[in-house]
C-alpha cells in the first residue's frame, strides 16, 4: 500500500480510527517520510525490492505497514501506527467468524497431525513455554515457605497467569497490535511524545530482552546441574565428559543452537509435546521415590503445614520463584497468531488447559517432594534442585535427569526467539532479511548465555532476581497497564479495578521478593 499525500485508499481511510490520536491529526505529508538508508517502510516486492525485516515480521503477525512517524524516522525502528492486514484468507478474529470460516483456508496448518496452530498443539506449546526448570525449584519454594503458603501462591499465580494473558488478548483485540513493544508505544507514546515515546518502546524491549535472556541463562545453569552428575555416573568424575562446562557447551552446540535457529515457533510443537511428557515423567519419578522414602522412613521432622516463619523473611524467597515458574506471557502473541481460526474463545481454551496442566504438575511435585525430604531441601548443597537430593545411582532419577535435560533444551529456544526478535527490531528493522545475520545474532545470544551460565552456578538466585524484576514488569505490570490505558471508564470502575489491583500488587510483591532474595543470598552471606 502506498502512503502519499493524495493516495489514501478506502481501506486506509477505514483503518484510521485505529491509529493513535497524536498521529491521526498530522498532515498527509508526514505519512510519506523515508527512514534511514532510503528504504520506505512499506516498500516490498510490489515496489521492486525485497521486503525489509520489520515488514516481514509484521506480515507474519498480520500487519500491513500504513504510515511513518516523522518524529522518530531517524531511529528507524518503531512506529505505533500499524493497522491490521485486510486479506480474505487471513484467519478471522471474532468468535462467530472463527466458527464459520471454511477449513480449506488452513490447508497449510492442517498438513500434519496435530496440525500447526491447532488447539492441542498450542496447548502443548504454551505449557512447554511455562514448564521447565521452574519445576525443579518448586520443592525448595515449598520448603522455605510452608505447604499452606506455597499452595496459595501457586493457585494465585495460576489465576493471575490466566488473567494477564486474557488482558493481553483483550489489548490485542482493541488495538489489533500483536507485540508488547507496539502496545506500549500505542498506549503511552502519545503522553510522553517525541523522542521519549521511542524510549517507551526501548524500555519494554530491554525488559523483554533481559527477562528472556535471563531465563535462557537459568535453563543452562539447570542443565549443567542435571547433566553433570549423570555424566559422572556414566564416565566417571575425572572424565573430560563429566566436566560441567564441557557438557553445557556440547548441549548448546548440538541441541540448543540448532533449535534456536528455527524461524517459526510452531516448528517446536512436537518438541514441546515431548517436553511436557518429560516433565510428567519427572513428576512421576520424583513422586514415586519420595513416597517410597516417606513410607520407609516416615515424614521428616520440621514439616510446616501452614507457613514457615522460623527463617524470618526467607519465606518470601518462594514468591519470585513461583512468579518465574508461570512466566509464559512473552510467547502469547506468537502462539495466538499461529492459532488456527484465532479468536478469544479458542485462545481462552488454550490458556485454561495449559495453565491447568502446569499448576497441577507444580502442586504435585512441590508438595510430595517436600513431604519426603522436609527442611533438608533448603540445604545449599542441593542448589534448590530437587534432583540433587536423590542419590546418583537411582535409575528412575537418572532417567528423569535425561528427560528434564530434553525439556530444558526445548524451552531454551522459546526464550531465544523473543530475544532475537527484539534485537532485530532495535538494530536491523529496515535491513533486508539475511540468513547470515540470523545465524550470527542467534549464535551470539546462545554463546553469551552459555558464558554467563558457566560462571553462575546457582539457579535460585537467577530465578529469584528475574522473577521479582523483569518477570513482574513483563508478565504482570505491563498487561495491567495496557488495559488501564485502553479500556474506557473510571479508574476504580469494573473494567479497570482488577487491572489496577494487579498492577499495584505486582509491584509490591516484586520489590519485596527481590529485596529478600538479595538480602538472603548476598548481604547475609558476607
Image (cartoon, grey):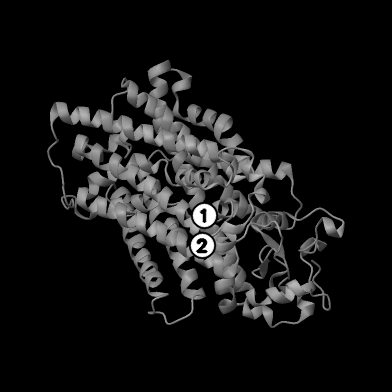
Q: Which residue is mark 1?
A: 332
Q: Nearer the viewer, residue 123 or 304?
A: 123
Which label number is shown at residue 240?
Answer: none
Residue 213 in the image: state x and y as whole percent: 51, 48
Q: Is residue 449 left or right of residue 467?
A: right
Q: Nearer the viewer, residue 196 or 16?
A: 16
Residue 2 in the image: state x and y as whole percent: 81, 68
**What crowding class fits label 1: few (fewer than 14 Cα within 10 Å), some (14-19), or many (20 or more)?**
many
Label 2–label 1 contact, CB within 8 A: yes
Q: CA distance from mark 2 to mark 1?
A: 8 Å
Q: Nearer the viewer, residue 232 or 387?
A: 387
Residue 76 in view in this figure: no
443 up-or-down from 70: above or below = above
Identified at 56% across, 59% down, the residue is 205
286 up-or-down from 168: above or below = above
Q: Is residue 435 left or right of residue 258?
A: right
Name which quarter of the figure residue 140 lies in. Answer: top left
Name which quarter of the figure residue 399 lies in. Answer: top left
Which label number is shown at residue 169?
Answer: 2
Residue 338 in the image: state x and y as whole percent: 59, 51
Residue 511 in view in this figure: yes
Amino acid at each position: 500500500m502506498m502512503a502519499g499525500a493524495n493516495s489514501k485508499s478506502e481501506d486506509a481511510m477505514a483503518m484510521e480510527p485505529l491509529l493513535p490520536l497524536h498521529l491521526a491529526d498530522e498532515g498527509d505529508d508526514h505519512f510519506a517520510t523515508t527512514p534511514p538508508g532510503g528504504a520506505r517502510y512499506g516498500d516490498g516486492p510490489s515496489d521492486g525490492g525485497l521486503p525489509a525485516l520489520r515488514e516481514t515480521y509484521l506480515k507474519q503477525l498480520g500487519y500491513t505497514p500504513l504510515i511513518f512517524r516523522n518524529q522518530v524516522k531517524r531511529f528507524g525502528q518503531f512506529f505505533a501506527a500499524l493497522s491490521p492486514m485486510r486479506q480474505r484468507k487471513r484467519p478471522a478474529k471474532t468468535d462467530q467468524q472463527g466458527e464459520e470460516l471454511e477449513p480449506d483456508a488452513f490447508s497449510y496448518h492442517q498438513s500434519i497431525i496435530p496440525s500447526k496452530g491447532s488447539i492441542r498443539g498450542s496447548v502443548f506449546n504454551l505449557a512447554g513455554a511455562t514448564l521447565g526448570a521452574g519445576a525443579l525449584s518448586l520443592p525448595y519454594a515449598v520448603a522455605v515457605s510452608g505447604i499452606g503458603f506455597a499452595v496459595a501462591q501457586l493457585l494465585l499465580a495460576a489465576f493471575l497467569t490466566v488473567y494477564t494473558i486474557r488482558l493481553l488478548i483483550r489489548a490485542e483485540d482493541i488495538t489489533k497490535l500483536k507485540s508488547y513493544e507496539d502496545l506500549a508505544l500505542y498506549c503511552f507514546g502519545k503522553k510522553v511524545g517525541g523522542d521519549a515515546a521511542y524510549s517507551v518502546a526501548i524500555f519494554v524491549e530491554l525488559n523483554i530482552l533481559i527477562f528472556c535472556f535471563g531465563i535462557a541463562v537459568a535453563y543452562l545453569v539447570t542443565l549443567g546441574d542435571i547433566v553433570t552428575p549423570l555424566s559422572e555416573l556414566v564416565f566417571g568424575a575425572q572424565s573430560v565428559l563429566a566436566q560441567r562446562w564441557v557438557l553445557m557447551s556440547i548441549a548448546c552446540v548440538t541441541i540448543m543452537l540448532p533449535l534456536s535457529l528455527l524461524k517459526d515457533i510452531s516448528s517446536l510443537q512436537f518438541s514441546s509435546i515431548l517436553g511436557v511428557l518429560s516433565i510428567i515423567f519427572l513428576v512421576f519419578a520424583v513422586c514415586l521415590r519420595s513416597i517410597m522414602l516417606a513410607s520407609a522412613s516416615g515424614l521428616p521432622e520440621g514439616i510446616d503445614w501452614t507457613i514457615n516463619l522460623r527463617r524470618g523473611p526467607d519465606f518470601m524467597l518462594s514468591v519470585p520463584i513461583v512468579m518465574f515458574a508461570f512466566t509464559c506471557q512473552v510467547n502469547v502473541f506468537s502462539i495466538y497468531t499461529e492459532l488456527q481460526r484465532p479468536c478469544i474463545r479458542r485462545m481462552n481454551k488454550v490458556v485454561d488447559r495449559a495453565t491447568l496442566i502446569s499448576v497441577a504438575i507444580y502442586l504435585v511435585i512441590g508438595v510430595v517432594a517436600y513431604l519426603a525430604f522436609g527442611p533438608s531441601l533448603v540445604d545449599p548443597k542441593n542448589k534448590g534442585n530437587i534432583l540433587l537430593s536423590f542419590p546418583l545411582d537411582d535409575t528412575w532419577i537418572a532417567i528423569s535427569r535425561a528427560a528434564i535435560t530434553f525439556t530444558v533444551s526445548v524451552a531454551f529456544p522459546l526464550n531465544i526467539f523473543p530475544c532475537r526478535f527484539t534485537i532485530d527490531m532495535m538494530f536491523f528493522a529496515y535491513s533486508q532479511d539475511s540468513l547470515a545475520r540470523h545465524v550470527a545474532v542467534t549464535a551470539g545470544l546462545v554463546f553469551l548465555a552459555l558464558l554467563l551460565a558457566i560462571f553462575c552456578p546457582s539457579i535460585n538466585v537467577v530465578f529469584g532476581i528475574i522473577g521479582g524484576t523483569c518477570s513482574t514488569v513483563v508478565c504482570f505490570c505491563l498487561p495491567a497497564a495496557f488495559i488501564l490505558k485502553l479500556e474506557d471508564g473510571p479508574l476504580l470502575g469494573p473494567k479497570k479495578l482488577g487491572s489496577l489491583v494487579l498492577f499495584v500488587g505486582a509491584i509490591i510483591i516484586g520489590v519485596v521478593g527481590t529485596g529478600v532474595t538479595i538480602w538472603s543470598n548476598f548481604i547475609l552471606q558476607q
